[in-house]
Structure formats: structure tokens, C-alpha cells
């Protein structure tokens, strides 16, 4: 039973409690797992995000201790950035708000961009040609976790429920994957088909093709668009660059 339905002190709220784990949890899990020590300790990172990282660590540690524990991950529609834990002898849960997911993206991405510019492209001759970091932004096309986080944000935004909730065993949460690098998408998709599933209406194959053609046409080459015209689904596998991620976060606010 949902943690929210058990709380008699609160007004009744509508919980969508049959959401599959991997599509809504995997993106956030991968982002948190891939955080470098430098990024975690960056002085510009909001304290709310740092506290959320600690909650993720606690949730993950508690999930791995006992296979008999029921685990759940929930996202509320609250715009304020919030993160909290539920830990009992039989249940282990992590609850974040929609505002927190947005703050994670808008605060981590700029730090990540600078880190990639400094470390991943060490010695790149383009640094001598321009001081702009725009040429690094296409790197994010290969980082599927950000696309999956956007999918969760839009799925919650579109939902008629106040809260979406995913429940599962320890194994389910541990195996949850964002299929993070597109270069391995075919092999990983066979092993974890839910990792390639999009649950929001916005990122449904036809919908995203039309949005991209109208708003983000310059993101892809003519060859990619030719292939997408024959198979709408292929466009999602091309990923999305940095500026598009930030744009989609902003669009989700209306």
C-alpha cells in the first residue's frame, strides 16, 4: 500500500501506484551514480541537491541490505524542490518532487558541461579557437540518462495523479538501467527492454518527431532526418544535446 494512503493526517491524494520502475527511476539513478567527487562537492551546487544525493545514497544502501524489503520510488507534483525517505522494517522508499528533478537538471548540467570541457576534452585544439563551450554540448546526445529524466518529468506533469509511485523488489531497483550510452543500445535493449521505454506522451515516437522537426531541426544531420522520416522511433535513439535538455526543462514549467 502506498505511503501516501497510509498517512491519515493528510488530505486524500490520488496516487498512480502501478508505474514500472525502470522508465521513471533509471534516469535519476544513473545521474546520481555517475556524479564525480568534484561535482558532488562543487560550491555552486544547491544544498537541496546535495541533501537529495544523500537521500539517494541512503535509499540505495537500504535497498541492497534485505531482499525481503519492499522498495518504492515516488515523484510528487510539487514545484518546490523536496526529497525525503521512508524507512521501516518492511518498506524502503524515496520521495522526490517534480521541482527537485528540475533543480537537479538545471544545477548539475552547467557544472557537468564545464567538467567535460576541462577534463574530457583536455588538450582539444578547439579550446584555442574559441572560449565558448558550445562545441561540447553535443556530447550529451550520448547520455541517455538525461533524456530519461526528462521523460519522468513530463510523465509526472502529464499525469492526472498527484503522485506517481513505482514499487518493486531490491533486484528490480538494482537492475534498473537508463541504457546510458546509445552505442550499446541494441545489446542493452535486449537485456533490459524497460530501459528503452518512454512513458510520457511528449516523447512518444511520433510526438517527439513532430516536436523535433518544428523546434529542434538543427540538432540532427540530413541523413538522420532521412532515416527518421522512414522510422519515427529512430530519432529518439539519436539523443538530445545540452541546449535541448535545458529547453525541455523550461517547457515543462508552463
Image: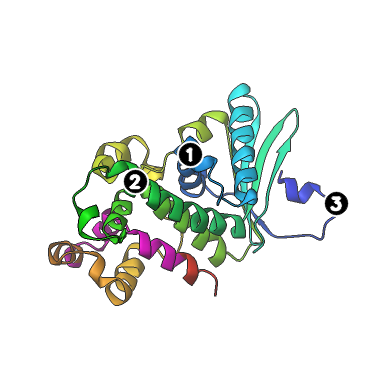
Residue under numbered circle 1: 38
Task: From the image, tell me which residue sits under label 3.
Answer: 8
The residue carrying pointer 3 sits among few (fewer than 14), some (14 to 19) or many (20 or more) residues within 10 Å by Cα, namely: few
Q: Quadrant of the C terminus?
A: bottom right
Quadrant in which the N terminus is drawn: top right
Q: CA distance from mark 3 to mark 2?
A: 51 Å
Disc 3 is placed on an element classified as loop
Q: Residue 201 vs residue 116: left or right? A: right
Q: Which residue is mark 2?
A: 118
**Magenta segment: does it hold 238?**
yes
Whether residue 89 is visible, yes or no, is yes
Boundaries of the magenta span: 229-248
* Residue 221 percent coordinates (x, y): 17, 64
Q: Residue at x 39, y 51 (%)?
A: 114
Q: Secondary structure at mark 1?
A: helix
Q: CA distance from mark 1 to mark 2?
A: 12 Å
Among the 4 quarters of the image, the one containing residue 192: top left
In-image side of 198 versus 138 (left or right): right
Helix, strand or loop: magenta stretch: helix
Residue for point 45% across, 51% down: 111
Is 119 placed left or right of 67 in the picture? left
Dot 2, how many residues are within 10 Å of its Cα: few (below 14), some (14-19), or many (20+)? some
Amino acid at each position: 500500500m502506498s505511503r501516501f494512503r497510509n498517512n491519515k493526517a493528510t488530505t486524500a491524494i490520488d496516487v498512480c501506484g502501478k508505474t514500472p520502475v525502470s522508465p521513471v527511476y533509471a534516469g535519476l539513478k544513473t545521474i546520481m551514480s555517475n556524479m564525480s567527487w568534484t561535482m558532488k562537492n562543487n560550491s555552486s551546487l544547491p544544498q537541496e541537491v546535495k541533501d537529495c544525493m544523500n537521500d539517494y545514497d541512503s535509499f540505495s544502501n537500504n535497498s541492497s541490505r534485505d531482499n525481503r524489503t519492499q522498495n518504492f520510488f515516488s515523484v510528487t507534483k510539487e514545484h518546490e524542490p523536496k526529497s525525503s525517505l521512508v524507512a521501516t522494517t518492511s518498506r524502503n522508499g524515496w520521495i522526490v518532487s517534480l521541482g527537485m528533478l528540475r533543480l537537479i537538471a538545471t544545477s548539475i548540467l552547467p557544472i557537468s558541461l564545464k567538467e567535460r570541457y576541462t577534463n574530457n576534452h583536455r588538450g582539444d585544439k578547439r579550446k584555442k579557437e574559441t572560449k565558448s563551450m558550445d562545441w561540447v554540448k553535443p556530447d550529451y546526445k550520448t547520455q541517455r540518462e538525461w533524456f530519461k529524466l526528462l521523460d519522468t518529468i513530463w510523465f509526472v506533469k502529464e499525469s492526472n495523479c498527484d503522485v506517481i509511485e513505482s514499487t518493486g523488489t531490491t533486484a528490480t531497483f538494482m537492475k534498473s538501467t537508463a541504457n546510458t550510452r546509445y552505442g550499446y543500445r541494441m545489446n542493452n535493449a535486449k537485456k533490459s527492454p524497460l530501459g528503452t521505454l518512454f512513458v510520457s506522451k511528449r516523447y512518444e515516437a511520433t510526438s517527439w518527431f513532430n516536436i523535433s522537426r518544428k523546434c529542434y531541426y538543427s540538432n540532427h544531420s540530413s541523413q538522420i532526418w532521412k532515416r527518421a522520416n522512414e522510422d519515427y522511433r529512430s530519432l529518439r535513439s539519436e539523443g538530445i544535446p545540452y541546449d535541448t535538455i535545458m529547453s525541455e526543462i523550461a517547457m515543462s514549467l508552463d
